[in-house]
Amino acid sequence: MFTGLVQDVGRVVASSEENGGVRLRIEAGCAAELSDGDSVLVNGVCLTATEPGRREFGADLSEETLERSSLGALGTGDYVNLELPLRATDRLGGHIVQGHVDGLGTIAEVREAGLSREVRIEAPAELLRYVVEKGSVAVDGVSLTVTRVDEAGFEVALIPETLERTNLTDALPGRRVNLEVDVIAKYVEKLIKQ
């Protein structure tokens, strides 16, 4: 389990196709904390760390991951948001994030708004049903508060701290982002339907 509070921004140093999947190598300060088989959140996708070293770690992308996320588009030099799993003694400062991407959104508009930057993200209707104003959503692994929502998408405000600590500082219109909606909303819907 994760919180959506990015701990590090890593850089893809290698990407290669292998047997229908993709193998990434990521340079990151948090690599030294990883062991083979540990979970790590990469742009909102829970991956398994392989061959971790002091400054880098590997991660394999299955066909399923490539189909459901934007990770297949990553190339050498791209920056990724990273988070290590929540420990039992940690604070839950963001919201519950599983690293199971629900779908992709597209950044439609970015505008400056005082200290913050407002970002509009278009998303499929099957995801928007779980997105509520003042609720939480994970965008490329970053826990954000929804400021507005309508039938075509939603908006979030990126404060200076978020812009400094995540790769969302480079968010431009047209960029595809991984979205994970609030898992509690999905469980509530399932219970109501029974």
Image: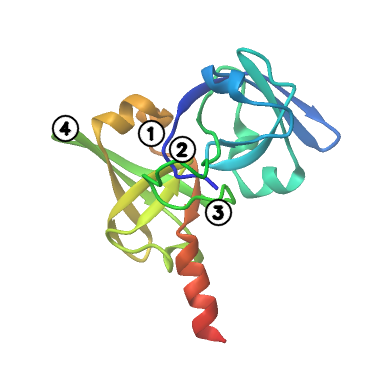
Q: Are marks 1 and 2 in contact (CB under 8 Å)?
A: yes
> Is residue 12 visible in this depiction of the protein?
no
The amino acid beneath tag 4 is Leu
The amino acid beneath tag 1 is Leu
> Residue, x 43% and y 69% (percent of image)?
129
Image quadrant in which the C terminus is located: bottom right
The amino acid beneath tag 2 is Arg
| Quadrant position of residue 162 | top left
Q: Nearer the viewer's eye, disc 4 or disc 2?
A: 4
Which residue is under mark 4? 115
Q: Nearer the viewer's eye, disc 2 or disc 3?
A: 3
> Which mark, residue 172?
1
Q: Is residue 150 left or right of residue 34?
A: left
**Residue sitting farthest toward the bottom:** 194
Disc 2 to disc 3, C-alpha distance: 14 Å
> Which mark, residue 68?
none
Disc 2 packing (10 Å; few <14; some 14–19; many ≥20): few
**Residue sitting farthest toward the front:** 89
Which residue is under mark 3? 103
Identify the colour scheme used: rainbow
Disc 4 to disc 1, C-alpha distance: 18 Å
Disc nearer the start of the sequence (4/2): 4
The amino acid beneath tag 3 is Gly
Disc 1 to disc 2, C-alpha distance: 6 Å
